[in-house]
């Protein structure tokens, strides 16, 4: 039981070292900020989006032209919630 625990600790620390190196190289390619929610239909929209709008210095992404037009017409209605 004790030996498996030691092996686990070793594996974890090695894995951590390896992971920290790996994440540093991947940071530039994978970003959480690259996915935004379409405020109209709540769909996930990936950057760069073809349809986007800026309202009150905040950028919003849309899945389609229809969603963008709806938002532009009455942005407050969709941001209240
Ligand atoms: Zn949409």
Image (cartoon, rainbow, N blue to C red):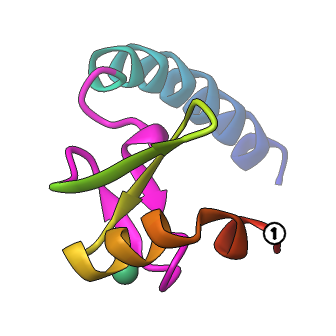
Q: Which residue is mark 1?
A: 80
Tell me the quarter of the image containing the N terminus.
bottom right
Frontmost residue, 34 versus 12: 34
Quarter in which the C terminus is drawn: bottom right
Seen as rendered, the residue at the extreme left is 50
- Residues rendered magenta in the picture: 28-49
Dot 1: within a 10 Å radius of its alpha carbon, few (fewer than 14), some, or many (20 or more) residues? Answer: few
Q: Quadrant of residue 24?
A: top left
Extreme residue toward the front, this view: 73
Percent position (x, y) of residue 36?
Answer: 46, 56
Q: Seen in the image, is 69 located left or right of residue 57?
A: left
Q: Nearer the viewer, residue 12 or 37?
A: 37
| Residue at 70% in and 65% down | 76
Q: Quadrant of ligand 1?
A: bottom left
Relative horizontal placement of residue 45, taking residue 11 as reference (left or right):
left
Q: Residue at x 50, y 30 (%)?
A: 15
Horizontal placement of 2 versus 63: left or right? right
**Residue 38 in sight here:** no
Residue for point 38% across, 56% down: 61
Q: Is residue 9 magenta?
A: no
Q: Nearer the viewer, residue 76 or 39?
A: 76
């Amino acid at each position: 039981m004790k030996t498996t625990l030691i092996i686990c600790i070793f594996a974890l620390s090695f894995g951590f070292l390896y992971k920290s190196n790996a994440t540093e190289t991947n940071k530039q390619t994978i970003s959480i900020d690259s996915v935004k929610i379409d405020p109209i239909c709540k769909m996930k929209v990936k950057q760069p989006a073809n349809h986007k709008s800026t309202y009150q210095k905040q950028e919003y992404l849309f899945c389609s032209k229809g969603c963008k037009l709806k938002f532009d017409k009455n942005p407050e209605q969709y941001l209240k919630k």
